[in-house]
Image: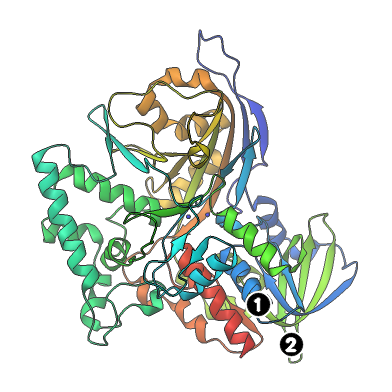
């Protein structure tokens, strides 16, 4: 996957107390809190200095995450050149990337599943960026070999041994439970509603509206799993990991419809890859956002909108620039590609239409990029993979940023990217992130690495980048399919909304669809 005014304090660069009795120098730790300063600016808009100038454009896009950049790309493809992109507090949003020790790595979402033919706009943009290289409209197109995840793709640590894949099958009981669950998900994936549409599809709008299927949204996924007999503990650990990874919450907080959607909505294939392959890059999905920026060639303003007023003849915006100036931006139309909890602060009409209690619940993220001067000694079992998960672990495992670059020999240095999401109550988790010191944050981030390698691996650790997002992703809780935010898709006027929050699933495919939809609406 990414999206914050919750954290007290600014980004810091500090050396931490390290392991007692160890000689290696403590690693340098950078703590990044995207949107903290900008969140303060939203609350203090009335105290901003008077505008230092005025800008005009035909279309203003507020936010440069996947939705905003997709909208910019589509408008450019259709010949619109009067577009201004206001980057927002974190350029590229949850798809941002980083460079640590000269090694590219993700600050957020790190892969994209292969899109099926129903995601025509995703395939088109991938073709435009040179990722999809042949058979655009085929069931199984050809993709750039550099972008297809290289083997080994995934492994899981269970009972002290690394196993290939993420679904545990090391014992007869494990294999039987996995086979039964897989067969059940295959059947649900093939199911169609009374309207002829797939029960579960991407974008969400392509899924069936059959009331018999939508009743799944009234219960939790945990309850559905119990009723379906999927209770084998290792299987449930895997499902728990999957829900935290995509939705930021455990199955007892997630809608059963959303839980099934995770396993049943994707049908993409590639002519030159095995089933289940994904697209990935060392820097994660920022490879795609960078490509969209190049393809759109859009004029960009570094800053963020702090006020929006829709007039009869135009939309008037106040923007605080990256150098702390205030400027007035007047646009004929606006695509607001901001998270809903942020957009409410700048748009009085949206705040009136969408009360705070109607906002989707959001989960915090912690992403840790770890610069290593070599690779840790491995346990027995499967070799180091791109994605490495500790079964029942506290975190979401770690990905290896240099995996796609390795051909014959490993590089001398690498970056492991560890993820944490879905721990405890979301509000309590945000408060903990707000109060925790750097040492506690680092220990929290390294839990899965310590479980995989024991603490001796830390001798390899030279630098750390911690990225904290208080509202990293929407949680699809029971009832999310009927959330009031969905009504915004039909909101008239000069302001259009485009963000994954509108559908309730924080996925690249969903975010890009909202950007595509807004651009096409604007184009008429």
Which sits in the foreground, 346 or 377?
377
- Dot 2 or dot 1: first in sequence order is 1
- x 55%, y 55%: residue: 94
Side of 256 relative to 462 (left or right): left
Q: Secondary structure at mark 1?
A: helix
Q: Quadrant of residue 462?
A: top right
Residue at the extreme right of the image, as rendered:
52
On the image, numbered disc 1 is attached to which residue? 77
Note whether 498 is above or below 324 in the view shown: below
Query: How far across and down, in percent of the image, does residue 78 sit?
Result: 66, 82
Question: Is label 2 in contact with label 1 (beta carbons under 8 Å)?
Answer: no
Residue 306 appearing in the image:
yes
Query: How far across and down, in percent of the image, does residue 306 sit?
Result: 72, 67
Query: How far across and down, in percent of the image, does residue 466 sit?
Result: 57, 38
- x 65%, y 65%: residue: 63
Disc sitting over residue 311 in the figure: 2
């Amino acid at each position: 996957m990414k999206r914050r005014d919750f954290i007290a304090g600014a980004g810091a660069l500090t050396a931490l107390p390290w392991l007692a009795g160890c000689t290696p120098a403590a690693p340098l730790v950078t703590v990044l809190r995207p949107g903290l300063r900008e969140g303060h600016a939203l609350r203090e808009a009335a105290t901003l200095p008077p505008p230092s100038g005025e800008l005009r454009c035909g279309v203003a896009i507020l936010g440069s995450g996947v939705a905003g950049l997709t909208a910019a790309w589509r408008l450019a493809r259709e010949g619109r050149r009067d577009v201004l992109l206001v980057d927002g507090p974190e350029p590229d949003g949850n798809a941002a990337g980083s460079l640590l020790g000269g090694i590219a790595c993700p600050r957020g979402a790190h892969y994209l599943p292969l899109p099926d033919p129903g995601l025509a706009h995703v395939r088109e943009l991938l073709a435009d960026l040179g990722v999809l290289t042949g058979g655009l409209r085929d069931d199984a197109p050809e993709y750039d070999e550099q972008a297809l995840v290289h083997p080994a793709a995934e492994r899981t640590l269970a009972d002290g041994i690394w196993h290939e894949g993420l679904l545990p099958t090391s014992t007869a009981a494990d294999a039987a439970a996995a086979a039964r669950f897989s067969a059940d998900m295959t059947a649900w994936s093939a199911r169609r509603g009374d309207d002829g549409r797939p029960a579960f599809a991407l974008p969400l709008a392509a899924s069936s509206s059959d009331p018999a299927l939508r009743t799944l949204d009234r219960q939790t996924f945990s309850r559905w799993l119990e009723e379906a007999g999927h209770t084998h503990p290792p299987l449930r650990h895997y499902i728990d990991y999957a829900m935290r990874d995509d939705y930021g919450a455990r199955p007892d907080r997630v809608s059963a419809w959303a839980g099934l959607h995770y396993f049943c909505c994707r049908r993409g294939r590639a002519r030159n890859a095995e089933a289940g392959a994904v697209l990935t890059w060392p820097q994660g999905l920022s490879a795609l956002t960078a490509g969209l920026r190049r393809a759109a060639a859009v004029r960009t303003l570094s800053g963020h909108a702090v006020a929006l007023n829709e007039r009869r003849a135009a939309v008037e915006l106040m923007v605080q620039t990256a150098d702390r100036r205030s400027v007035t931006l007047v646009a004929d139309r606006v695509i607001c590609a901001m998270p809903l909890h942020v957009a409410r602060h700048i748009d009085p009409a949206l705040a009136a239409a969408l009360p705070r209690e109607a906002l989707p619940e959001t989960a915090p993220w912690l992403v840790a990029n770890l610069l290593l001067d070599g690779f840790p000694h491995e346990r027995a079992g499967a070799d180091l993979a791109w994605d490495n998960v500790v079964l029942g672990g506290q975190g979401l495992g770690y990905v290896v940023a240099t995996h796609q670059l390795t051909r014959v020999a490993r590089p001398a240095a690498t970056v492991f990217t560890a993820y944490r999401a879905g721990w405890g109550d979301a509000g309590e988790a945000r408060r903990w992130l707000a109060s925790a010191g750097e040492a506690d944050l680092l220990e929290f981030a390294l839990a899965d690495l310590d479980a995989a390698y024991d603490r001796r691996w830390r001798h390899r650790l030279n630098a750390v980048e911690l990225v904290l997002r208080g509202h990293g992703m929407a949680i699809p809780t029971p009832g999310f399919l009927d959330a009031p935010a969905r009504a915004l898709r039909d909101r008239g006027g000069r302001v259009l909304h485009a963000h994954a929050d509108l559908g309730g699933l924080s996925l690249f495919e969903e975010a890009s669809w909202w950007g595509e939809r807004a651009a096409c609406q604007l184009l008429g």
